[in-house]
Image (cartoon, helix red, strand yellow):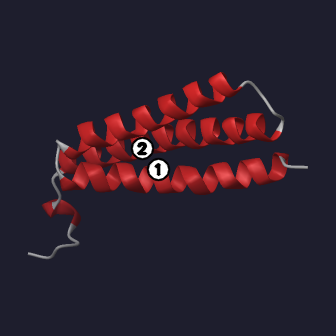
Amino acid sequence: MSFWSITDWDWTMVLGFTVYFCAGLALGRIYFHVLWRSTEMIVANGRMWMILVLTIGRLALIVGALIAVSLQGAAPLLATALGIGLARSWTLRVTSEEAP
């Protein structure tokens, strides 16, 4: 039995990996977008209480989500982390085009 044989895969595992990857992608996109907006507010001398609220909310979101996913096991945590990593690259690419 080969590891790469498509007939040996458990499709529910593949579907679960895909769902957690997409969730990580969405979570990472939100996290890094809020980080970008917070940074813009700091540079523009924005309201400090709003920056603090965004920072605490951003950290609470990512920590809470990763703790919840870690309770599901290593594979979902890995898929979510991969999604977050890809979202970071995506956000850096998008924001570098927006930067002056």
* Residue 97 coordinates in the image, percent (x, y): 82, 51
* Badge 2 amino acid: Gly
| Residue 19 or residue 78, whichever sits in front | 78
Residue lying furthest left in this view? 1
Tell whether label 2 touches label 1 (CB within 8 Å): yes
- Residue hosting label 2: 24
- Between discs 1 and 2, the one toward the N terminus: 2
Q: Amino acid at mark 1?
A: Ile
Question: Residue 68: image x %, image y %?
Answer: 25, 36
Q: According to the image, label 1 marks what residue?
A: 84
Q: Is residue 6 left or right of residue 37?
A: left
Residue 62 position, x and y percent, is 41, 39
**Label 2 crowd (10 A; few <14 / some 14-19 / many >=20):** many
Vertical relation: 89 (above or below) 76: below
| Numbered circle sitting on residue 52 | none
Residue at 41% across / 33% down in the picture?
A: 60
Q: Report which quarter residue 43 is drawn in.
A: top right
Which residue occupies 73% across, 24% down? 47
The answer to whether 92 is drawn above or below residue 46 in the figure is below
Residue 62 left/right relative to 28? left
Measure how far apart labels 1 and 2 are at the Cα level: 5 Å
- Taking the spot 17% from the left edge, 73% from the top edge, the residue there is 3
Instruction: Identify the residue at horizontal 14%, vertical 76% (top origin).
Output: 2
